[in-house]
Image (spheres, rainbow, N blue to C red):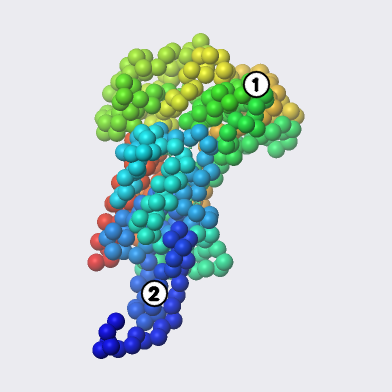
């Protein structure tokens, strides 16, 4: 400042703590209030949208209920790696370092997300959970932790597809005398060394946890399967399954079903003798129903070696026993339910009529529900082409639309 410049008017300052940068954002009350765009959730989806908005000069504030970004990745099991490639998993404006390898480890995903927030100087408020979102004229009011009432010009909901662990309401579940947990709390096989464990559910998580337990010293591992999945190799002759997922996305369902069956016969062994016959519905048909194929990261070998036994689906619990759909009763030491998650958007948005019968938002990406302009969703689809890739694409679309609406 030179002597000729007037002294700045003393102003009250309003600070927003951004935990990642250990810094403070400053606004002056003398400027006309331009409400920010609020992004609910500091996972990859929310961070990507915030960065894409910032790149277009739109102020975005990320509200994250936990104490750091990437909360879900911090909580996943230890051995998890991305099954999508490093290149096809990067968010807008920052590559994932080559040193992280082709299949990025969970801890490195967390490092990447921290770096991402820092590089884009994102405004993130941690420890703030949004409980309800309400329309107020042209704007949005968010009710959040500590009685906060925050007004935004638009809202992006990025609270995650895998929000709340779901354990089916099996008869006898609550009175079960054995140990029953959800896969969300599984970290590594150590606590299960020497134990007889039943994993319920053969999605990607159940399949990998079963393999992890078998490799990590559990005495016996059984995997309860209701519907046999499509199992694909993560790569075939160096070609990642994710790239096939991207290529086939726009092809007719019947064609993909046929192609998938041919590739499966060549690439994966027949596991019928072990209780895993090839599915009778095609890969694309299943995908339409919301089921992504299981990427093999050890299950096939473990099943063939007899280290993971396939059993029928769980029907009920009785005392200390698990009753299976074929009538067998077993008494494992521990049951791990890899039975998925719910979006749990009802408390936040249920009153706005923006959710479908299964609790998913009726729109995603740049489109808003008709009656709620300015309300965007990201991360609520489960695409075969890789969720991180889709989050990156949707972030750009959402930011473009919001920036355009603000002009
Ligand atoms: C085990 C597993 C492995 C996966 N592997 C891959 C992979 O290899 N490749 C790939 O492309 N995708 C993968 N995915 C899918 C997807 O990419 C990840 O789930 C990703 O983390 C989704 O990002 P998100 O931001 O939408 O949700 P999340 O990462 O779940 O982030 C949501 C955030 O919102 C916060 N939050 C929730 N509710 C509120 C609220 N009311 N107020 C404030 N904050 C809130 C949460 O604390 C969380 O930090 C995987 C998913 C799982 C479960």
Q: Nearer the viewer, residue 184 or 356?
A: 184
Residue 24 percent location from the top left of the image: 44, 68
| Residue found at x 44% / y 81% | 12
Q: Which label belongs to residue 219?
A: 1
Residue 252 horizontal/vertical position (percent): 27, 28
Furthest residue in direction top, as rendered: 273
User: In the visual, does 248 lie left or right of 194?
Assistant: left
Position of 42 with respect to 245 (left or right) is right
Q: Secondary structure at mark 1?
A: loop
In the image, residue 287 lies at what x, y percent? 38, 31
Q: Is 367 above or below relative to 60?
A: above
- Relative side of 371 to 19, left or right: left
Find out whether the residues at labels 2 and 1 contact each other: C-beta distance under 8 Å: no
Q: Is residue 344 above or below residue 401?
A: above
Residue 263, by quadrant, is top left
SS class of the residue under badge 2?
Answer: strand
User: Which circle marks residue 27 in the picture?
Assistant: 2
Q: CA distance from mark 2 to mark 1?
A: 60 Å
Q: How many marks?
A: 2
Residue that appears at 45% across and 58% down = 20
- Give whichever of 323, 25 is nearer the camera: 25
């Amino acid at each position: 400042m030179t002597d000729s410049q007037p002294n700045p008017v003393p102003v009250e300052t309003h600070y927003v703590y951004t935990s990642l940068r250990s810094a403070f954002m400053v606004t002056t009350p003398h400027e006309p209030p331009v409400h920010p765009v609020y992004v609910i959730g500091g996972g990859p989806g929310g961070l990507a949208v915030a960065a894409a908005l910032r790149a277009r000069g739109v102020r975005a504030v990320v509200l994250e209920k936990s104490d750091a970004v990437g909360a879900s990745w911090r909580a996943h099991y230890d051995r998890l790696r991305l099954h999508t490639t490093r290149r096809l998993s990067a968010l807008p404006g920052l590559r994932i370092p080559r040193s992280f390898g082709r299949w990025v480890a969970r801890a490195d995903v967390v490092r990447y997300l921290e770096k991402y927030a820092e590089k884009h100087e994102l405004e993130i408020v941690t420890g703030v959970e949004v409980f309800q979102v309400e329309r107020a004229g042209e704007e949005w009011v968010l009710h959040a932790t500590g009685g906060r009432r925050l007004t935004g010009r638009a809202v992006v909901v990025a609270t995650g597809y895998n929000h709340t662990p779901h354990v089916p309401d099996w008869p006898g579940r609550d009175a079960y005398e054995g140990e029953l947990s959800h896969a969300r709390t599984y970290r590594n096989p150590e606590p299960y060394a020497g134990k007889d464990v039943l994993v319920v559910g053969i999605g990607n998580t159940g399949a990998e946890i079963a393999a992890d337990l078998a490799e990590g010293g559990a005495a016996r591992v059984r995997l309860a399967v209701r519907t046999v999945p499509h199992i694909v190799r993560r790569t075939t002759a160096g070609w990642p399954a994710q790239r096939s997922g991207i290529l086939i996305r726009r092809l007719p369902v019947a064609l993909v079903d046929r192609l998938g069956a041919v590739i499966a016969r060549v690439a994966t062994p027949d596991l019928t003798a072990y209780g895993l016959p090839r599915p009778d519905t095609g890969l694309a048909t299943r995908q339409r129903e919301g089921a992504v194929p299981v990427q093999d990261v050890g299950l096939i070998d473990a099943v063939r070696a007899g280290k993971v036994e396939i059993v029928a689906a769980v029907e009920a619990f009785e005392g200390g026993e698990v009753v299976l759909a074929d009538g067998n009763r077993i008494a494992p030491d521990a049951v791990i339910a890899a039975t998925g998650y719910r979006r749990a958007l009802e408390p936040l948005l249920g009153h706005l009529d923006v959710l479908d019968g299964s609790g998913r938002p009726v729109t995603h990406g740049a489109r808003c529900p008709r009656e709620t302009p300015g309300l965007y969703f990201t991360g609520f689809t489960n695409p075969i082409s890789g969720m991180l890739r889709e989050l990156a694409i949707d972030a750009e679309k959402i930011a473009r639309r919001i920036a355009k609406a603000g002009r």
